[in-house]
Structures are given as structure tokens and as C-alpha cells.
Amino acid sequence: MAGWYELSSNEGGKFSFVLKAGNGEVILRSQSYAGESGARNGIASVQANAPNDAMYERKQASDGRSFFNLKAANGQIIGTSQMYKSESGRDNGIESVKTNGPGTTIKTPD
């Protein structure tokens, strides 16, 4: 099964999205946006930038865990991954975003 985006809003009216792999695991989490259109623009940016390896910023947290940010052409962070125990886990996460990010399925909570 292909991955998908989940678009949601919080109690304060801010919107965000996550990108999920086909198994339902969250592989990328967005920032908060003031409106739904901003979040949808963020999804479009992930769709456009996900296949490009140069758009991934590979990072290491102070506790040694690895993670990555996906950046837009303007350098803004579009989404951040979960924390991984190893660099190879992080790199597998990047490959999953490259595969699932271009998808067009967007789900909203019922």
C-alpha cells in the first residue's frame, strides 16, 4: 500500500500534516500552519522536494540519535523525521519519504 498524508487541525485552529508510509508509520511531521491552505502548500512542497536527495538535511541529536529535515528550495524546513537509533535507520527513513512523498492521497480526520 502506498503512503499518504494526514491533514489535521488542533484545538487552537492551527493545521499540520504527517506523511505516513504504507504500513501507517509516521515518517515526516510538519510544522504548524495558521490555516489549512498553508498546510496544503506544505504538502505540495513535500511532494515536489521529496525525490531530491539534496533537499535532506541529515542531523544528529545531542543524545546521539539521528534524524533528518526535508527542506524546500528556499531553505525552509518543510518537515522533520522521528528520531532514529542509527544513521542507517535515518537513511531508510529518507528513502521512505522519497518513495511516499510524491503521493497525492490526503486524508483528514472524520
Image (tube, rainbow, N blue to C red):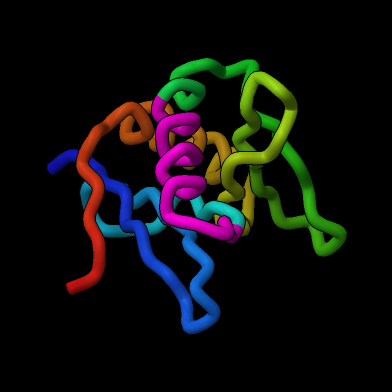
Of residue 49 and residue 109, the one placed in the foreground of this image is 109
Q: Position of residue 5 (x, y in %)?
A: 31, 49
**Can residue 95 be spotted in the picture?**
no
The image position of residue 45, as x and y in percent, is 49, 30
Residue 50 position in % (x across, y down): 47, 26
Q: Quadrant of residue 73?
A: top right
In which quarter of the view is residue 101 placed?
top left
Q: Is residue 101 left or right of residue 54?
A: left
The N terminus, quarter of image: top left
The residue shown at (80%, 55%) is 61
Q: Toward the viewer: 68 or 45?
A: 45
Residue at 50 percent across and 40 percent down: it is: 42
Residue 63 is situated, as x and y percent measured from the top left of the image, at 82, 63
Q: Tell me how many marks there are.
A: 0
Main SS of the magenta segment? Answer: helix
Up-down relation of residue 72 to residue 1 (above or below):
above
For the record, the magenta segment spans 32-47
Q: Residue pushed farthest left?
A: 1
